[in-house]
Image (cartoon, rainbow, N blue to C red):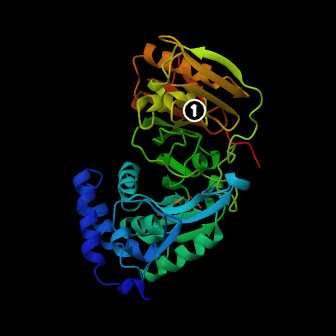
Amino acid sequence: MDLVAVAGWEARASALTDRLIELGVLVDPGWIKAFKDVPRHVFVPEVLRGGGVISASDPEWLDLVYSDETLRTQTIAAGEGIGRHEIPTSSSSRPRVMAAMLARLGARPGHRVLEIGTGTGYNTGLLGHFLGPDHVASIDIDPGLIETARHYLAAIGQHPHLTAGDGAEGWPEHGPYDRIIATCAVTSIPPAWIDQLADGGTIVAPFDAGEAGPLLVLTKTKPGEVTGRIDPYPAHFMPLRQRADSPLGPGQTTGFTEPGIPAYGTTTLNPKDVVDVEGTDLALFLWLHAPGLRLASAPGRVFVHTDTALAQADLEPVEPGRWPVQQRGTMRLWDTVEHAYRSWLDLGRPDPSRFGVSAPRDEDQFVWLDNPDSLYSWPLPVPSPL
Ligand SMILES: C[S@@+](CC[C@H](N)C(=O)[O-])C[C@H]1O[C@@H](n2cnc3c(N)ncnc32)[C@H](O)[C@@H]1O
């Protein structure tokens, strides 16, 4: 099927663009035109959904492609036995998130941009439309994705610079870059990005901070360092992974595998207060105290876990103001959550925009509250080499 010639896509692309304008994420006329003119459907001939595949021959495909939804395009099986499950390794990101990130990038005609995470190539196509494909370089860790993206981009007449490799190393060949945009999430800023960014340049990258999933918008303020505020926009991206055959980011595992013997006790923190943390101001604060923290709830209890520690708290108190807790693994995770929750209250429930990041290439990178010299700072976990 000649996907470029599919009938009816222009009206759908236009309606999606109008929706993004309405949401306030699309303002610049150059990006508005890019979202109207670049055919998303060419980049996603197949969408993985609910265990099946929706392809170009399915009647719902075109509407799905022009909806404001993430379209999953590739997964890898992970885990063992009954714990085996599919984890996404590539997708066409949610259009509202793409538009919000491109707006924050502040790219202007003439700029050179490096994109980390080519995926389907759709975002590369938007960048190419706005800047000219020759000003765009894009890298993906998966060589197969680079080949398909190259093919789809050529089909719409674009020939940007594309390469397969670990985006954590950047791609010095076409730099220095005025802007770097990552479409996979990081826990710290790779030194290569700082080196390859022009002075005064901007990095926009999803922050792999668990349930919070905000953005980092950082500027190169001096040689060898980027700094800036955390932007609370909920982006939620898959991690920057270290290998093409694995869905996992640095330090991640497919689950908590070493239960050990639990410590039993009680807590005076009502577990309900942390259960609905997703998307709230508390989520980032908890993650800073326990990087990798995830929350889950089951009937009657709340679970918090990292890859090496697990705690469960009952929603039913044993007596007024006291709830049962079990903790196991490498740290007393509930104790950490409780401490973090009380500090968060003491500090006046700071929202994520009060936090910033200082990322020197050769020293420790850290998150700060209000200003880089504040009394409160938390180290960013630096990925260990494979
Ligand atoms: C959400 S998808 C990208 C969406 C893409 N920009 C688009 O418009 O289709 C994330 C991508 O990041 C890529 N990725 C993950 N880790 C990477 C790494 N270390 N280097 C380069 N790309 C990586 C994945 O292979 C995946 O294609």
Check the picture and name the quadrant holding the N terminus: bottom left
Q: At which x and y percent is residue 201?
A: 47, 48
Q: Is residue 90 above or below residue 324?
A: below
Q: Left or right: 167 with respect to 301?
A: right
What is the count of numbered marks?
Answer: 1
Task: Name, please, the residue furthest toward the bottom.
Answer: 1
The residue depicted at 45 percent of the width and 71 percent of the height is: 133
User: For this rendering, which residue is in front, 310 or 245?
Assistant: 310
Q: Left or right: 5 with respect to 384?
A: left
- For the residue carrying disc 1, how many other residues have a C-alpha within 10 Å: few (<14), some (14-19), or many (20+)? many
- Amino acid type, residue under disc 1 in the picture: Phe
The residue depicted at 40 percent of the width and 57 percent of the height is: 94
The residue depicted at 50 percent of the width and 39 percent of the height is: 211
Q: Which residue is mark 1?
A: 303
Q: State the image quarter where residue 171 is shown.
A: bottom right
Q: Is residue 339 above or below residue 20?
A: above
Q: Left or right: 335 with respect to 45?
A: right
- The answer to whether residue 384 shows anywhere in this view is yes
Q: State the image quarter where residue 167 is shown.
A: bottom right
User: The residue tagged with tag 1: helix, strand or loop?
Assistant: strand
User: For this rendering, which residue is in front, 358 or 123?
Assistant: 123
| Ligand 1 closer than 8 Å to label 1 CB | no
Q: At which x and y percent is residue 197?
A: 54, 50
- The answer to whether residue 356 shows anywhere in this view is no
User: For this rendering, which residue is in front, 202 or 120?
Assistant: 120
Ligand 1 positioned in quadrant: bottom right
